[in-house]
């Protein structure tokens, strides 16, 4: 079990239907005994949309923020994370489109969908 401190940058896994498996960036606001954390999301807002969403989560829902690795070239079959809808979603490159723009088609097993993404929206899969 990881031991996070106030101010640590983390990613929080979502278990809500339709968002299952997506990781959202955030910050640890407080550690609550026994072993729960209050986190604040970077990209998700409260229902009133006036401030960032804060939630209490278990340590199992957190992982350290991965280091930034410059977007590189990906090959068909590579497991990647795609930044979409304010979070990181696990997928697999299924096609590289020709041209200078290096666009990739990524398949998401979690929902059976696929989409087109630029290298700047991809990173090496983090799990």
Image (cartoon, grey):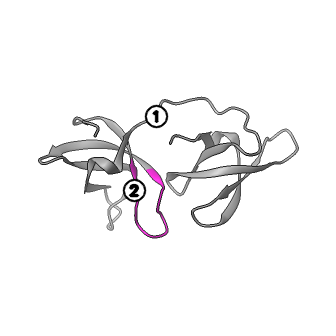
- Answer with mark 1 or mark 2, whichever residue precedes in sequence: 2
Dot 2 surroundings within 10 Å: few (below 14), some, or many (20 or more)?
Answer: some
Q: Which mark is residue 66?
A: 1
* Mark 2, secondary structure of its residue: strand
Task: Please tell me which residue is depicted at 73% across the width and 45% down the height of the picture.
Answer: 77
Query: Residue 5: horizontal and vertical position, in percent?
Result: 22, 35
Q: In the rendered picture of this protein, how many numbered marks are placed on residues?
A: 2
Main SS of the magenta part reads loop
Residue 44, numbered circle: 2
Report the residue that reaches farthest toward the right: 98
| Residue 85 picture location, percent across and down | 53, 58
What label does residue 56 carry, if any?
A: none
The residue drawn where x is 48% and y is 57% is: 21
76 within the magenta span: no
Direction from residue 84 to residue 2 in the image, left or right: left
Q: Is mark 1 on a helix, strand or loop?
A: loop
Q: Are marks 1 and 2 in contact (CB under 8 Å)?
A: no
Q: Quadrant of the N terminus?
A: top left
Residue at the spot 23% in from the left edge and 43% down from the top edge: 29
| Span colored in magenta | 12-23
Q: Are there few (<14), some (14-19), or many (20+) residues within 10 Å of tag 1?
A: few
Question: Magenta includes 20?
Answer: yes
Find residue 24 and report its horizontal and vertical position in percent: 43, 50
**Which is closer to the viewer, label 1 or label 2?**
1
- As drawn, is 1 to the left or to the right of 89? left
Residue drawn at x 66%, y 65% as measured from the top left: 113
Q: Residue 13, how many percent across, how many down?
A: 40, 53
Most distant residue in the bottom direction: 17
Q: Distance between the residues labelled 1 and 2?
A: 19 Å
- In depth, the one of 83 and 18 nearer the eye is 18
Whether residue 91 sits left or right of residue 96 in the image: it is left
- Find the residue positioned furthest to the left: 33
């Amino acid at each position: 079990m990881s031991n996070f401190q106030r101010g640590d940058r983390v990613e929080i896994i979502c278990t809500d239907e339709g968002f299952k498996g997506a990781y959202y960036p955030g910050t640890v606001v407080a550690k609550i005994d026994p072993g729960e954390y209050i986190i604040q999301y970077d990209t998700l807002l409260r229902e009133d949309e006036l401030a960032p969403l804060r939630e209490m989560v278990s340590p199992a829902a957190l992982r350290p923020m991965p280091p930034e690795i410059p977007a590189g070239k990906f090959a068909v079959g590579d497991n990647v994370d795609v930044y979409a809808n304010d979070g990181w979603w696990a997928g697999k490159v299924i096609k590289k489109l020709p041209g200078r723009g290096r666009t990739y088609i990524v398949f998401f097993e979690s929902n059976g969908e696929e989409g087109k993404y630029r290298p700047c929206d991809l990173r090496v899969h983090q799990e």
